[in-house]
Amino acid sequence: MMRALLFLVFAATPALGQTPTYSPEPEAGLTTPYLGDWEYMVGGGVAVFDCDGDLKQDVFLAGGQGKAGLYRNISAIGGDLRFQPVESGLEIEAVTGAWPLDIDGDGLTDLAVMRVGQNRLMKGLGGCKFRDASADWGFDGGDGWSTAFSATWEKGATWPTLAVGNYIDRTQDAFPWGSCTDNWLHRPAGATGFAPPLALKPSYCALSMLFSDWSGTGHADLRVSNDREYYKGGQEQLWHVDPGQPPRLYTEAEGWKRLRIWGMGIASRDLDANGTTELFLTSMADNKLQSLNPGAQKEGPKPTYDDIAFARGATAHRPYTGGDIRPSTAWHAEFSDVNNDGLDDLFVAKGNVDQMPDFAQNDPNNLLVQGPDGKFVEMGDKAGVADMGIGRGAALADFNLDGLPDLVVVNRREVPKVWRNVTADAGGFVGLWLADEGANRDAIGAWIELRTGAHLQRREVTVGGGHGGGSLGWQHFGLGKADQAEVRVIWPDGVVGGWQPLAADGFYRLTRTGAEQITR
Amino acid sequence: MQSQKLREMRLGRRQVLAGLVVAPALLSARAARAATDGTAVVDSWYRLTLELVRHTPIYSPPVASRAFAYMGVILQECLAGGPEGLVSLAGQVNGLPPLQPSSAPVDTAFVLHTALSSAVQSLFSHTGPTGQRAMAAMARNLTDKLASAPHPDASTARGKAVADHVLAWASTDGGAKIENMGFPQQAVKEAKPGEWVPTSKIAQQQAPLLPYWGNVRPFSMAGAADCGLPPPPPYSEVVGSEFYTEAKEVYDTSHNLNDEQKAIARFWSDDPMLSPTPPGHWISILRQISDRDSLSLDRQVEALALLGISMADGFICCWKTKFDYNLIRPVTYINRVIDKTWQPLLNTPPFPEYPSGHSTQSGAAAGILAHLFGDKFAFSDATHEDDGLPARNFSSFAAAAQEAALSRLYGGIHFRSAIEQGLVQGACVAGHVARLKTRAT
C-alpha cells in the first residue's frame, strides 16, 4: 500500500526539467523581413503548417510593407533547420499576419491572411501552392488594418466561423485615439462560403482574438484582447457566440470583470489540467496570467478571472538580462513544453513599439520554464534565446522532428531568427496530429488528454490567438521520464475517444478509430 | 478684487506683442478663428496634450500636473508685456529668470503656436510613435493655417525663445527625469503595521510611485511644508478606534453604494493611461468653460497658467505629506482587520494613502478657478463622454472638488481624513497661487 502511494506521488509530480538549450540557426534560410513604419508597428506574424504533405511544418512570414513569403521546410530529421523559399501565390504585400486552417474541408490547409487593406482567404492547392479564394467563398476582406484572427466550427456547421480583429482607422493618423474600427464575424452561408460579415460592436482595437472553450463545457466563445492605447471606454472582451444567435458580450452580471491592458497577444493552455483554460495576455510592463476564480464557478461557469501572473512568476515585466531595466513590451506568447518534462513552458516575444524611450530598447525574449510547483522561472538567457531584436510574432514547432520544439521569431525590419532546440537529456515526448472526419478536418475545438501515470495534461486545439500568427499540425507533448503515455481525444462534437497507449518518442496520427504511429 | 476685474475684462481675440496690431485675415470669423486665432491655437495644442498625457506611460498624475504647469507658464510668458495686460511670472515663481522682451514685431498666434509646439514636443518626447505623428501633424497643420500671418520669422524665434527659456528652467526642478514609469526598482520589503505596503499584483508596482516628488521645486511657495497637514488618525486595529471607524466607513460604504455613487466614483477615477489623469480632467473642465464662454485669449492663458501651477504645487505638497506619513491603504487594512476578501470598486493607486491626491489637487484647482471666475460658477463637465460616462453638472468649482474628493471614499481607496484634509491642503495651495500677479493692473 505504501509503495503504491509513493508511486502515485512520484508519478503525479514531474521531475524538475532540464534547462533548455537553443542553438541559433543563422543559415536557416528564412529571409523575409517584416518591413514598414507606423502601419506595421503591430503585426509581424508567422504561420506554421505543412503545405506539401511531408508532415514537416513549413513557414509563412508576413512581410509588412514588403512581400510575404512561404518557405518549405527542408530540414533533415534531427538535423539543422533549413528552409527554402517557394513560389506559392502567397507573395502578397501589406500582410500583417496569417493563420492556417482547412476552411473548405478538402484536406488541404488554407491560409487566412490579414493585411493593411483587403484581407484574403488563400485556398491551399497542394504542393505549397495557393490561390485567392476570397471571392469564391463570399469573403469580404474589407479595407481595414487587420491584426487578429480566430476560427471555430459552430455546432452543426460544415463551414467555419471566422473572426477578424481590426485596429485603428488608419486614415486618422493625426488624431487616431478613439478611432478603433469594427471587428468582423464571418459566419457561414450554407456549406460553400460566408455570409456578409457582422460587425462586433463595440470594438476596441483588437490585437489578438481566440475562439476557446474557456469553461470546458464544449462550447467556444470569442475572447478579444484590445490595445488600450487607442480605445475609449473599452476593455478586454468575451463574446458569446451561440449558433444561430447574434454575438453578444458577456456582462458583469455574468461574472465578467473589466480589464484594460495594452492587449497584444493571447496564449491559452489548461495549465492545471482542470478542464478550463488559463490565458496569458501580453501587454506592456506587467503581463497577465488569468485563471478562473474557483469561488465564482460554484453555480456554473463564470468568466471571472484572477490574475495569477505575480504568484506564478510570469509577469515578465522587465528585461532580465542586458542591463536595460526599463519596462518590457510583449507581443506573441505561446505555451510549449520545451524541455519535455511534462510541464508547459512559456515563450514571449519582446520588442519596443518603435522608439518609446520609457520602455526597454534592449528587450530580450522570455523563455519561462515551468517547475513542478507551477511557478515559472526565466531561462531565456541560459537557453540562448534572449535576443534583443524588436520582436513581434513567433512560433514554437518541432521543425526537424527530433522531439524538441524549435523556435522562429519575427523582428521588425530584419529577417526572422531561428533557433534549433538542442536540449540535452530532455524528457520523452510524443507528437500528435489530429485528423477528423467531415468538414473540420483538423479537429479545431477538440481537447487532447494525455496522461503519464497520474500526471494529466489537457490541451484545447484552437486556431487564433498569439500575435499575428499561429500553428497547425503537430501537437507536442513532453513526457518527462515516462516511457509511455495514454492519450484520448474529446472530439469537437463531444464524442470522447478511448484511451490509446503510446510509446514515448514517437509521432502519431490520431483519428476517431485510434492512434497510428508515423515513421519519421 | 482681481477676480472681479478679470470677469469684467473682454479683450479682442487677435493682438500682437509690442503694441502692434495686425490686420485681420480676410476670412469668415469662424474660419479666421480656426486658422489664426490665438485661442484656437492654444486650445488645439491642449486638446492634443490631453491625449498625450493619456498615452504617454510616464504620465502619472504628478508628472501630468508638472507638464500643464510649465505649458501654462510658457503661455503667460508669451503674452507678458503685450497689449493683453499680462505680466511675466519671472521673479514670482521660484527660480524663473526674466527673459528679454522681443524687439521685433511678432504675431501672437504664431508665437503661441511655436512656443507650444516646442514645449509639447519636448515635454512629450517620450510618447510613442502615434503620439509623435500626431504632434508632427499638429505642428504642420497649424503652421499651414498660419502661413499668412505676418512676421513669421520673428514670431517663430520669439515662441521658441520663450519655450526654451522656460524649459531650461523646468529642467532644474527635480521632476524632469522619470525612470521605470516612476517606480523605484527595489520592492518594499518590510513595513510597520500602519505603513503602506504594495496593494497590487503588478510586479512593477511593488514600490510606491514617485517617492521623491515632494522634493520637486514648487512654483508658488517656498516648499511643500508651506501647506503641510496634521497627521492622520493614529493607526489602530481596535474596534471603535478612530482609525478603525474610518476604515469601517469605507467598508460599509462599499457595500451600500447606489448607482449615483458608483457613477461618481468612476467619473472621477481618472486613471493614468486610461484618462487624461486628474490634472487633465481639470484642464478639460477649463477647456469646456473657455469654449462655452468664448474666453478671450488673455483670460484663457491666465487661467491655464494658474490652474496648471495650482495642480502642480498641489501634487508636490500632497506627495510630501504622503511620504512623511506613509499610511496604509484601506484595502490592506480592511483585508487584515475586517474582511480578508474585500475589494474596492476602484483600483487602489500604488502609493501611500494620506492625503488623497485627487482631493488635494481638486481643492487647489477649484480654489484657483473660483478665484478667477467666481465662487458660484456653474458648469457642465463632459470630460469622459467619449469613454461612455455622461456629463455631470456642478453649481460651483467647490462642489466639483468636493464630489471628486468624496469619489475616493465611494471607490474604496481613501479614508475620510485623507479626503477632507486633502481639500484643506488644496485650498492652502490655491491661496499661494492666487497671490501670483498675472496682470499689470
Image (cartoon, coloured by chain):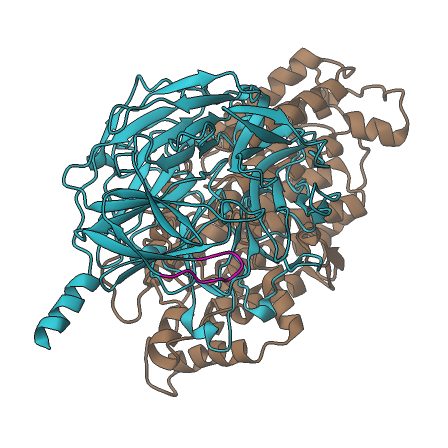
Q: Nearer the viewer, residue A28 or B54?
A: A28
Q: Say which chain is brown.
A: B
On screen, residue A420 versus residue A191, left or right, reads left
Asked if residue A491 is among those painted magenta in the image, a careful observer would answer: yes
Residue A92: percent from left, percent from top: 58, 21
* Residue A178: quadrant of the picture: top right
Residue B439: percent from left, percent from top: 67, 39
User: Visible in this render: residue A509?
Assistant: yes
Residues in magenta?
Answer: A490-498
Q: Residue at point 54% right, 50% down?
A: B311
Q: Nearer the viewer, residue A246 or A252?
A: A246
Is the stretch drawn in magenta largely helix, strand or loop? loop
Quadrant in which the C terminus of chain B is drawn: top right
In the image, is residue A100 above or below residue A91?
below
Q: Nearer the viewer, residue A351 or A28?
A: A28
Q: Colour of chain A?
A: cyan
In the image, is residue A431 above or below residue B361?
above
* Residue B105: quadrant of the picture: top right
